[in-house]
Amino acid sequence: MRNKMQLGIILAGLFMLRAPSTASSLSAYAFTAAGESSCATFGPTDVLRNAQAGGSIAVATPGPGCNVIESQQYFTAAGGPLTAGSTASGGSATTFGSFAYTGSSDAIVDFHSLGVRAVGTLSGATDSFSVRGSEAFAMFDDGFIAPAAVGAAGYVEFNYSFHGSQSTTGRGETTIELHWRKNGGAQFLASRIMNASSGLTFNVNGAYLTSYPGVTLAGTTATADASLSFWVPASAGEHFSLNLALFGSALPASSTGLPGPSTITDDFLNTVTLTSIVGLDGSGNPVSGAVERDSDLTATPEPGAALLTASALLLLLGRFRRPRRR
């Protein structure tokens, strides 16, 4: 009886060491908010916080209310295409006068494409309790199998088209950014166009670029019709899950002293389309064999988990092969 209990404990431990099974899924999120908050704390919505897709509107927490008008749609599904949309208008008196905001956002996603759009117009003066902005994200989780020819330390290259435009009139901040993560691990930046207090910037795979074929940065306006890629580390025959998320936001600021309202248009509704997926060896050279899609996979355990699994197996064998004392 004691042996059976120990065996059950060890097998349970081995089960826990396995990486979780991941099924393919799509997510579409759109959120717009406007109003002078009566609550003292601010932060992202729960949906965006859990997705970790990027920056966000500083919306009044703990949730809807606080004299703020909020419009949110969030959908998940195993297949697509999937869409979400939001629109809201609001405003109020502030410490420095009053403001009015009107905005909307949209998201569309499938397993080969992602798109978001966020637009907003603000007139008047705001303060630290003024909530206004539009945001959206499109996200998919899918599984892939690296070809054997990539070797022990190769890569899977995801090539995609990047198309859309971004413009700011007056004051405010806006961003369009694509993130990826492997097997639920750390999130990496694939590309981003951002107009913030530091000016208009373009980032690809963590590096800031002043020029790139198909991307034009002029004043507070950016246009993109480019081909980009990111590399995911992979080993021969590895099954892995990929999370790809596109986030966009429009956060106009006070128009006090300006000839007109602050307006932001961040339109990348049909921006990211996967054009090809290629296996690469450790030197970055293309290899033979197609990258296969695995829509329902169990990711390969990390090296630490594999080591613990091997140790548990040795303990198990040693425990039950030990001769009994008479």
Image (cartoon, grey):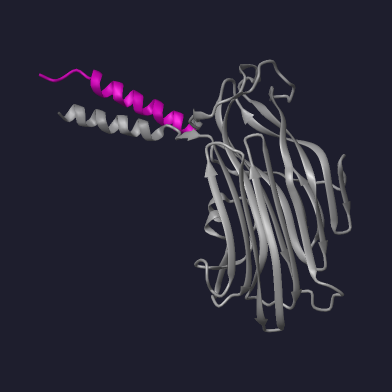
Q: Where 264 sits versus 186, above or below?
A: below
Q: Is residue 283 above or below residue 73?
A: above
- Taking depth in this image into account, of 88 and 322 the one nearest to the observer is 88
Q: Pinpoint residue 97: horizontal percent, then vertical percent.
A: 72, 84
Could you tell me which quadrant the C terminus lies in? top left
Q: Nearer the viewer, residue 39 or 155?
A: 39
Left or right, 204 with respect to 9, comes to right
- The reply to whether residue 48 is in sight is no
Please state, as top left, top right, bottom left or bottom right, where the N terminus lies in the image: top left
Which residue is painted at 65% across and 79% down in the image?
92
Above/below status of 253 relative to 30: below
Q: Can residue 224 be seen?
A: yes
Locate residue 6, reporting x and y percent: 23, 31
Q: Is residue 59 left or right of residue 173?
A: left
Which residue appears at 57% of the width and 55% of the height? 73
The x and y percentages for residue 12 are: 31, 33
Is residue 324 one of those drawn in magenta?
yes
Find the magenta span and give its range: 304-326
Query: Magenta region, mostly helix, strand or loop?
Result: helix
| Residue 99 coordinates in the image, percent (x, y) | 71, 77
Which picture quadrant has residue 191? Answer: top right
Image quadrant in which you'd find residue 197: bottom right
**Residue at image coords 62%, 39%:** 81
Q: Out of 7 and 21, give the one closest to the viewer.
A: 21
Residue 74 vertical position relative to residue 127 in the rendered view, above or below: above
Return the residue found at the far right. Answer: 218
321 or 140: nearer the viewer = 140
